[in-house]
Amino acid sequence: MAKNDKHAIPQSGFIRATKLFASGARVAAREVAGQISGKTTVTTRIKQAQDMVETLGKLKGAAMKAGQLLSIEAAEYLDPEVVAILRKLQDQVSFMPIDQVRFILQRQLGREKFETIEDLSFEPIAAASIGQVHKATISGQTVAIKIQYPGVAKSIDSDLSSLKTLVSTMLTVTGKKVDVAPVLEEITKSLKQEVNYLIEAKNVELARRHFLGSSFAVPSVLHDYTTETVLVQSYEHGVRINDWIKSQPSAADVDVFSGLIMHLLVTEIFATGVVQTDPNYANFLYRPDEKKLVLLDFGATWTYEAEFRHRLHGLVMKLIKDDSKSMVQAIEDHGYFSPKESTETKEKLRIFIDILQQVTQNTDGLLSIKEEIPHSELREVGQSLGLTIKHTSPPKDLVLIGRKLAGMVRLLQEINALVHIPDLHKKIEDVKII
């Protein structure tokens, strides 16, 4: 890719920071102008969000990835219209040309290994904020080769520092005192792990050990062809989740698929603590004939200690047992809610928990994720809660787990999944925390 290519991803830390700071300056300027002119703040903030999406989409890398995460984790602190625009970052797609891909592979693997790669796909079969994936053949085996965009790892600290300034500006002009630093620190930690493909290779092997012989399929790694920025794995067949949904699967197949998702969540979050925290549908494939879920992309995999999982399990059990008073106190004791918050805010938290408990107490049988969970009410109360919060930062140790849960609930909602609540309760109660 030529240096003067207007579509090139900026690699210079100075240039990337300048673009982010410029976006922040425009955010502040529009807010002031909106207040002076008397125009609605929502209209002003929509323009601010559009500016952020355009800037982050061009930068890709850590800035774009963090922006995607913030569009989920900071959703309750921003206007709904703004969040909708920020989530368009999930749809931003661009990729390196094949010549640059070949150059990177030869440089990373050496000429001898590079020349054993055959049938390299001209365009990627997947492209995201940090890298892209190509299909190829090595020694007769069909493989998937993930190649990281140049300069991504080096830009993390500067990108996140600049993004912190940008988001803080956006929150400040809306009168928020919420500190986003803990969340961004968690995102930074996750990104620094995610850009090291040698760590991802270890995560793949860890997942294979946990799910070996189960209803899940995990790729195998070709370690001789894997470096910090190139990851080569077995190519796994399966139907893309979006394509499977469009095929209008039978109710029986939806039940099987839903059961796999629930089993995956309980196993990852409570039993093993090895959680693949990116809920992007592209990270899964489904094999209807085998009734198997294929798990892909373990870059955003995070391991949670048993002590944390016991604490989280305790909170969920209070929810299941309809112990709202004890749960609210436990949330505050664990530092997930500041005692400085107003009485109004605490009441909104209690109402939110009460709604969740009404859902978990549906012990009559099957619960429709789409029809029987009051999504709009939860969203409205959650947004109202978030907009009144003044002192509580998003709990950093729940950021990535929350992201996974939110994504999986959206998936179950989209396929109109039915969940047998008593069975789910028993699965959670009986889980063995390793």
Image (cartoon, rainbow, N blue to C red):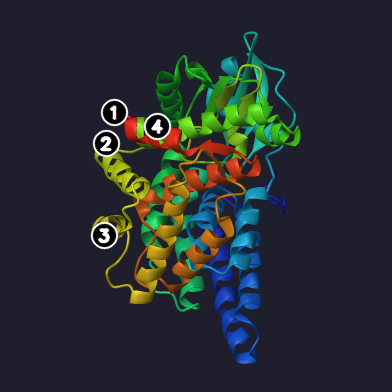
Q: Nearer the viewer, residue 334 or 34?
A: 334
> CA–CA distance between discs 2 and 3?
22 Å
Q: What kind of residue is marked 2? A: Ala
- Looking at the picture, how far across and down is residue 281, in whole percent? 61, 38
Which residue in the protein does label 4 denote? 427
Which residue in the protein does label 2 denote? 306
Q: Nearer the viewer, residue 101 or 352?
A: 352
> In front of the other: label 2 or label 3?
3
> CA–CA distance between discs 2 and 4?
18 Å
Circle 1/circle 2 CB separation < 8 Å:
yes
Q: What kind of residue is marked 4? A: Lys
SS at mark 4 in the image: helix
Circle 4/circle 3 CB separation < 8 Å:
no
Give whichever of discs 1 and 3 has the lower sequence position: 3
SS at mark 2 in the image: helix
> CA–CA distance between discs 4 and 3?
25 Å
Which mark, by number, is residue 329? 3
Give whichever of discs 2 and 3 has the lower sequence position: 2
Position of the N terminus, as image quadrant, is top right
- Give the residue displayed 53% in from the left and 27% down from the top: 231
Position of the C terminus, as image quadrant, is top left
Give whichever of discs 4 and 3 has the lower sequence position: 3
